[in-house]
Image (tube, coloured by chain):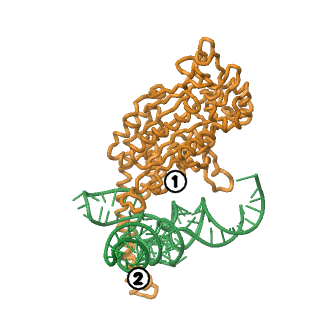
Chain colours: A orange, B green
Amino acid sequence: MIDPKLLRDNPARFRDGAAKKNIAVDIDRVMALDERRRAVQADQERLRAEQNKLAKESGPRMGQLAGAIKKASGAEKETLERELAELRSRPAALKEKIQALDGELSALEPGLNELLLTIPLPPDDDVPVGKGADDNVELSRWNAPPTPHWPTGFDTLKSFHHNRGFVPKTHLELVRDLKLADFERGVKMAGSRSYLLTGDGMLLHNAVLRYAFDFMTLRNGFTPMSVPVIVHEACMVGTGFFPAGREQAYHIEESKRGGGGGHDLFLTGTGEVGLMGVHQGEIIDEALLPLRYTTVSTCFRREAGAAGKDTAGLYRIHQFDKVEQVVICKADEAESRAWHTRMIGYVEELLRSLGLPYRLLQCCTGDLGPKNADMVDVECWMPGRGDLGRDSRPLGAYGETHSASRLYDFQCRRLNMRYRPGGEAGQGPTQVCHSLNNTVLASPRVLIPILEMYQNADGSVTVPEVLRPYMGGKQRIG
RNA sequence: GGUGGGGUGGCAGAGUGGUCGAAUGCGCCGGUCUUGAAAACCGGUAUGGGCGUCAGCCCAUCAGGGGUUCGAAUCCCCUCCCCACCGCCA
């Protein structure tokens, strides 16, 4: 959520931000509702103050009178009753007014709160303005240098054949021929975009996840975590995936079961939700910041609206596993930016160690979600992807494998995660934390570049050297 | 799933209709004393929101929601969570 105070001070900034992101929100309506709410609230508070004062002043007298009336009779009783009735009439009138305002508030607030949740975080000024993915800007490329295994290295400007001397198979062909995955049975069991990983396919999947997890925890000091992947709606709203992405999440309607009770639950589409939810509603000890968490978790995505897109293979699927990194730091733009660079750096180092050519893309404003101020995607080279050449074989293309988001306080405000500057003894108000997140590695999607890049002319696949310890020393598949 | 007991400030723990945003202890911060520290003593110490140029004022919050009442931490209803025992279970 954005800071309502900032909205009041500078609505134009949020109007612009939403426009740049291509997100439709009626800022003027939010402002009007917000103003009305505060006016009603102020009225109500004034009346309450009066009510409290009256209760304090005349309350005890009322008690006395009520007691005296019980004992009294005749004219005396009548006098007392009259006095009591008079004392009661004023607070009673106040109460009616307060309740009327209460009614107005409860009619107003749900709508306002819902609208506030839909206002996106404005993109940073240095994010290029654009309509969609086509306007993203390439920041850098990394091409695999020569190795003993591949003396030529790999240059993505040249064809796979030129680089390696043979025509590559696509990952679909490789997993079929090497029996690494089974799409037919996956679809039989769970419908489209479902799959099984079998044999060496499963081993490779586990190996690369474990390698990435160890890379973040053992080598880079991130705290290893296991977090829930079925969560309450509050976690989804708090992390900013709802309401905008509601259609993307699997929904478990526990509340609809017989017997009543039970909260609805949602399957998370990324470990980010679980990691960010950990400290929901907490005031974090400043000395513990920045929190650096990493988790490996199964991710569930409905892929609503993606019908017909990337339907084949391991690219776009409903269930996958992902190592995710999250940083929760102080409210400081420079620190947030520094972490962003660092978190992308981890991914670059990881991909380089795997020998996978990649590029960094600065996402344009139109490609940002509601919750980020800035986002950098990492795309790996996938030889079996892209347009077909004259031989009806794919020419190769970059495919998104990572996404690094910088969110300022957008998430932490919704999650109510704060810290007190100056620590325990610190004076002054609490501050909302900043948060960032970035993929470390998602599999099986990353198996696509691994299999396609490491295939050999004879149809086998070499196991990347860094993964061999995680595969019992195995050097080759097939 | 069954039965019983609970949920109060950073923590522990009082409080069963007004004098309670809340005793007391611990912790924490500041001070006195001390060569220094400890002890002792004194003072301070929740969060969110609104108004105000400042000083400050006001409102809300005792798990959450609703109700009774002039007035609720306290009474009533619902929900959630925790603990104990029993049952079931990977």
Chain to which the residue tagged by mark 1 belongs: A
Dot 2: element: helix
Please tell me whether mark 1 or mark 2 is closer to you in this view.
Answer: 1
Locate residue A149: give its quadrant.
Answer: top right
Confirm whether residue A101 shows in the render: no
Please rate how many residues cluster around mark 2, counting C-alpha atoms within 10 Å: few if below 14, some from 14 to 19, many from 20.
Answer: some
Front one among A371 and A191 = A371
Locate residue A307: give its quadrant.
Answer: top right
In this rendering, the answer to whether A436 lies above or below A66 is above
Across and down, in percent, residue A288 comes to 48, 54
Across and down, in percent, residue B58 comes to 34, 65
Front one among A91 and A130 = A130
What kind of residue is marked 1? His
Q: Residue at x 65, y 23 (%)?
A: A170
**Which residue corresponds to mark 2?**
A65
Please rate how many residues cluster around mark 1, counting C-alpha atoms within 10 Å: few if below 14, some from 14 to 19, many from 20.
Answer: some
**Which residue corresponds to mark 1?**
A279
Tell me the CA gap for discs 1 and 2.
53 Å
Dot 1: element: loop
Locate residue B2: give its quadrant.
Answer: bottom right
The answer to whether marks 1 and 2 mark residues whose Cβ atoms lie closer than 8 Å is: no
Across and down, in percent, residue A425 comes to 40, 62
Q: Is A398 positioned to the left or the right of A103 in the image?
A: right
Q: Is A349 positioned to the left or the right of A122 in the image?
A: right
Chain to which the residue tagged by mark 2 belongs: A
In this rendering, the answer to whether A424 lies above or below A204 is below
Across and down, in percent, residue A243 comes to 51, 43
Quadrant assignment for the C terminus of chain A: top right
Front one among A114 and B52 = B52
Q: Which residue is drawn at 39% across and 47% down?
A: A332
In this rendering, the answer to whether A368 lies above or below A230 is above
What kind of residue is marked 2? Leu
